[in-house]
Amino acid sequence: MTNPTQTNESAMTLEQAFEHGVSLYQHQKKGEAREVFEQILNHAPDAVPVLQVLAVLDSEEGQWQAALKKLDHALSVSPGDASILFDKAHLLAQHGANKEALEIVDALLDVAPTNQELLALRQQLTAATGQRGESRRTAKQMDAVSTQKQSALKQEVEETLSLAGQMVATGNLDQAKLLFNAVMNVAGDVPAALLGVAKIYLGEEKYGLARQHLLRAFEQDNSDKETVVLLSHSAIKIDDYPAARTHARFGLQHWPEDAIFCRLLVLSFEKEQNWLEAYRQASGFIKQHPEDADLLNRLATASFQLLRARHNFTPAAITACQKHIQQAARVATPENKQRLSTYLAEVLWYKGEANTSKALLEEYIAQHPQDIEAGFNISFVYRTLGEWENYYRANELGITCNRRLQYNGNVPQWNLERPKDDVVLVMPEQGVGDEILYFHNLAMVLENAKKVYVACDPRLEDILSRAYPEAVMVPVKRDHGQDIDIPESVLSDITAWVAGGSLAGICFANFGRHIYQSPYIKLAQETEAHWQSQVAALRKANPDARLVGICWRSGLAAATRNIHYLVAEEAAHLVKQCPDTVFVNLQYGDCRKELNKIEKLSGVRIVQLDGLDLRDDFEGTAAVIKALDAVVTAGTAVHRLTTAVGTPCHVFFAGTEASDFTQPQTLNSDSELGYFYPPMLENKYPLLETIARQIQAI
């Protein structure tokens, strides 16, 4: 504003008034804006900016002569001002005074020959005055100026990008980021600059910011492969897996020969822990890229995790998984090769090659003693081999890595060296069958503590309360991967805690056996009498038959021909071998189709007791089991319930490749016989015939 007042104080006031007027104009309050500007002009009649704004308002209202008068007044205050002259030329052109306007424009172009706005106005004016040749020449001049500016800008951008690249190469990332941003400030969304900043953000693990810049780069140029790769990568980093797959599939459409997009697609499913789809995708891409180390590694990982997650322990799945792991290990990096060796060790354990599995894991653990999960995993191998001291030591690592239970107590872990006045919390872990097993050892805690809380599956509360009335039962519901929620009243009372699965190790270390007492379940008289009468009626209807419970699999029925379980054909073969036996169904879950198939194949109907809830009524099931002569079962909760009741139990397990099922082993009591067989045994009929002979000897 040119000399609007004589004092700084009033100048500031008028300056603020001018800003207020501009704001009103921008908000389309033009009448109010005019009032403000005219008031300013009353105080400062030579204020050039005010005169220019009022000229615009006059022109918008059709008062172009008044507008012209104000511009001439402004020129008298500031002669030769290019901004005022341009406004005057533009105003004259709007109202047909083309020749006068052209004179002003030509005069201005003498000073600023490359001004794009002046050239555009000159082209308009020469065309309006019939000077077509001049209009065409002006248009060419405009194009030449534009090309020259673009060329200069392009060169400047390239030089700046080159310098930014040097900054990145030398590690001056902050300086590089400033240069990339300077390019964007001058030239807009330049893809190379956006990509450069995005890569810096990726290195800083600012994945959201990186993704924003990559998306802007992609909008400008979707033909850059690196941008598409990093878009998919950044989406994975922020857990937006569908977006990651969209980018990867775009890449596959445009660069079908490049394996990077195959890897990213598989990785998106892997990070999502969708092992089935990761396996399917990797299997398909391997056909196109059979030697790609990354795809082979991801195929092996998906195969292994799918085997675990779905409990798909079938000979075919185990063998296929082993093949994938070994193929991946052949071309893997040293780091991946070591990780794959732990996968292979577990798969070999499934196969029954326990000694080879042990050697692989012990070699890995020697090199990676900090890998607690591997240290815990080897406990299963030690258990299979009967190396009990090693097993119990390694099993405790499952608490450290939260694999056994999601709980970390703030008080010491209990053992027999603890004070006798301890108030102890016994924590559940794994499944309900494991809990039933652990509570064989509960008396050991009760005898050596002042008070004992027992956290347990709600379905076991009544049965455990009768078995151990001096203990306080704390029913808790558990969700996989979630911390166990213990009431605050209990936590504030305890002085020590112990995981249920640790009790066997304490018992073994102090008493040389795995369980403190054998049968411990005590049934409610009413429940026992009810189910005894049902079984007694069955005996009366079959006076010369033995009554045997049967359970052939876990509740996970999805995996057919699982190495740990029987299928209907195999259960039917067992039933056929025992003509003087009535089999009572103890298989929990929906097994109607299997029961019908067993009957069709064997000609024998397995008895289903009316009203017996095999999934949730553990006391009723225990009462039935107690009334039977024996139980044949897979290693499930039925096995644990049978031994806790004291009924003779014939349980079959996948052992090692050297296991001999013809020689059943006495387990924790004389009434508990284990039939161990090679896990990859294709024909289980000889195993079942051995069990049948033992049953017939009852």
Image: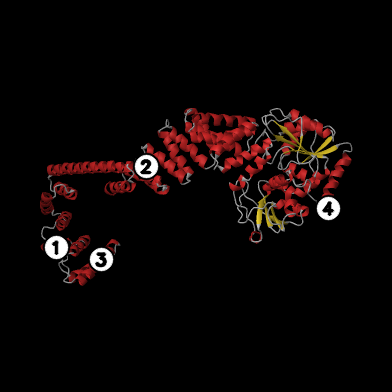
- Which amino acid, by three-letter code, is at mark 2? Phe
Location of residue 547 in the rendering, given as x and y in whole percent from the top left corner:
83, 39
Q: Which residue is mark 2?
A: 218
- Of residues 404 and 18, the one drawn nearer to the viewer in this rendering: 404
Q: Give the numbered dot on residue 21.
A: 3
Q: Is residue 191 visible?
A: no
Q: Mark 4 or mark 1: which comes first in sequence?
A: 1
Q: Quadrant of residue 60?
A: bottom left
CA–CA distance in space, label 4 to label 1: 111 Å
- Which amino acid, by three-letter code, is at mark 3? Gly
Location of residue 692 in the rendering, given as x and y in whole percent from the top left corner:
80, 32
- Which amino acid, by three-letter code, is at mark 4? Gln
Q: Which residue is mark 1?
A: 74
Q: Mark 2 or mark 3: which comes first in sequence?
A: 3
> What SS does tag 2 mark?
helix
- Which amino acid, by three-letter code, is at mark 1? Ala
Q: Mark 4 or mark 2: which comes first in sequence?
A: 2
| Residue at 14% in and 50% down | 112
CA–CA distance in space, label 1 to label 3: 19 Å
> What SS does tag 4 mark?
helix
Other residues around mark 1 within 10 Å, as few (<14) / some (14–19) / many (≥20): many
